[in-house]
Amino acid sequence: ILNVEQSPQSLHVQEGDSTNFTCSFPSSNFYALHWYRWETAKSPEALFVMTLNGDEKKKGRISATLNTKEGYSYLYIKGSQPEDSATYLCAYVRSWGKLQFGAGTQVVVTP
Amino acid sequence: DGGITQSPKYLFRKEGQNVTLSCEQNLNHDAMYWYRQDPGQGLRLIYYSQIVNDFQKGDIAEGYSVSREKKESFPLTVTSAQKNPTAFYLCASSLQGRVYGYTFGSGTRLTVV
């Protein structure tokens, strides 16, 4: 089973600060990469599905970039707010129907 | 509103018993999935189904069984053969195609007592 690594495991951010974190995945036979936000006591929510090298996606203050040649994706949060506190999961699509999830980056935004 | 409903939210099982976790969706999604979460690990795929009456094993299918008799429903049975069933179980669904993200249920926490 291929490894999907997320770093850091957790981070604490002051309200208003910007932050970013990484998802590393196998660079061969790329199919797609998903990002999800998982707030405590809620269901994981899809943020982005990225399919092309150089993809940049944006949703409000959250954006993501993709480099399939080197096997990494960055997620950025601009001007963090307490409601951004969640675990952010990335998932590498190994083949149709088979997502390989990373363990997640837990983000805590303090006022 | 469309979504996925998992039940029950909490489930306690005695050793040697089979239990069934329910997953129902009204999103008209063809594909459905079951994942398991253990502390400190990423979600791991148990089973998935692309269409009714068809399903495939994921990475950790041993000790589990599923059925897909209706498009809306994808129940997961945790059998007594599953050696370490205590975990958090998530069901998801999606449209077919690589550009579509998954919609997840709220999960079932299973504890063996």
Image (cartoon, coloured by chain):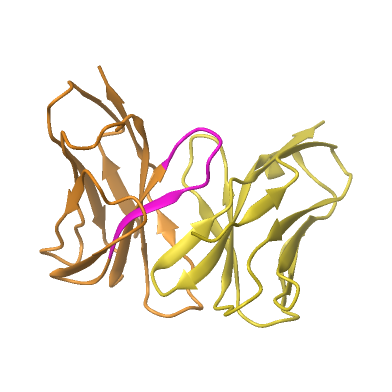
Chain colours: A yellow, B orange
Q: From the viewer's perspective, is residue A11 above or below residue A92?
A: above
- How many marks the image carries: the answer is 0
The image position of residue B106, as x and y in percent, is 39, 43
- Identify the residue at image location x=25%, y=47%: B62
Residue shown at the point (30%, 24%) measured from the top left = B111
Numbered range of the magenta stretch:
B37-48
Residue found at the far front of this picture: A1
Residue A64 horizontal side relative to residue A4, left or right: right
**Where residue A56 sits in the image (x, y, percent)?**
74, 75
Of B112 and B96, which appears nearest the observer? B112
Picture quarter containing residue B15?
top left
- Horizontal side of A9 relative to B77 (left or right) equals right
Work out whether A73 lies above or below B111.
Answer: below
Vertical position of residue A30 compared to residue A10: above or below: below
Extreme residue toward the right, this view? A17
Residue located farthest toward the top when viewing the structure as drawn = B113
| Residue B60 in the image, given as x and y percentages of width and height | 34, 50
Q: Residue at x 49, y 67 (%)?
A: B101
Within the magenta stretch, is there residue B44? yes
Let me know if residue B47 is in the magenta part: yes
Please state the horizontal and vertical placement of residue B39, each as a whole percent of the image: 51, 32
Viewer-side residue, A39 vs A52: A52
